Amino acid sequence: MNSEEETARYEMTKLGASLFDRGFSVGTAGNLSVKLPDGILMSPTNARLCDLEPDRISKLDLEGNHVSGDRPTKEIFLHQAFYDTRPEAGAVVHLHSTWATALSCLEEIDPEDCIPPLTPYVVMRVGTVRRVPYVRPGDPKSGTLIRELGGKCAAVLLANHGPVVSGKSLFSAVCAAEELEETAKLVMALKGQPVQTLSAPDVTDLKKTFGTI
């Protein structure tokens, strides 16, 4: 095991525990992955994010074959789809966080752009978020739906399920997932109120300056 892989394994345990301890993940819900030059590290199936052990984290080769560690999460298809369509993605975070999941259940949201630009930070760190149709957890079709987006979005909401967020690093993916959750909370808190969002020119300026992922 090289130093890059060892560092990634320990970072997964540290950030996984942080997400769990702060309520972004409950029970065995949620999963993390990190892409390496020779494969993908992924949290194991039926593991709480607070209980990840560096040596037991699953490792897959770049084709998605399990090569070591515990059996990987059944949501492997979500992670692979982001890596296959977004070459800049170095990590993926899938959560069942309360407010983003609640938002994913609403009939009224725009599936093409379901997170309004309420703050500059959601534009800077998350970008446009699509809602993809519901499929059973672990169904390979979930990966197909993300691939159909052609890498245009760094984050999606799985209908009636929760968010999936990619980032250049695990730290940036976790921060983006946290920003998405807090923005979803704002959306729910402001329902029924007149809301001022950022203007289209402001959003364009932020995207040009900071980009996404």
Image (cartoon, rainbow, N blue to C red):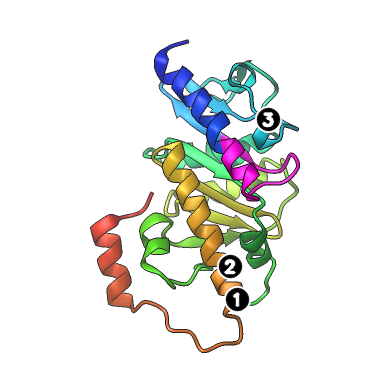
Identify the residue at image location x=43%, y=56%. 126
Q: Viewer-proximal residue, 75 or 193?
A: 193
Numbered mark located on residue 189 in the image: 1
What x and y, as percent, mark residue 204? 29, 68
What x and y, as percent, mark residue 28? 74, 39
Q: Amino acid at mark 2?
A: Lys
| Residue 38 in sight in this render | no
- Label 1 CA crowd tier, 10 Å (few <14, some 14–19, many 20+): few
In the drawing, does residue 79 fall left or right of residue 4? right
Instruction: Look at mark 2 in the image and give the residue it sits on.
Output: 185
Q: Viewer-proximal residue, 135 or 169?
A: 169
Outermost residue, bottom direction?
194
How far apart are labels 2 and 1 at the CA level? 6 Å
Name the N-terminal-most of marks 2 and 3: 3
What x and y, as percent, mark residue 107? 68, 74
Q: Amino acid at mark 3?
A: Asp
How far apart are labels 3 and 1 at the CA level? 32 Å
Identify the residue at image location x=48%, y=84%. 195
Asked if the residue at tag 1 contacts the one at tag 2, i.e. Cβ–Cβ closer than 8 Å, the answer is yes
Task: Find the magenta span and give its range.
Answer: 16-32
From this view, report whether residue 40 is shown above or below residue 172.
above
Q: Viewer-proximal residue, 127 or 61?
A: 127
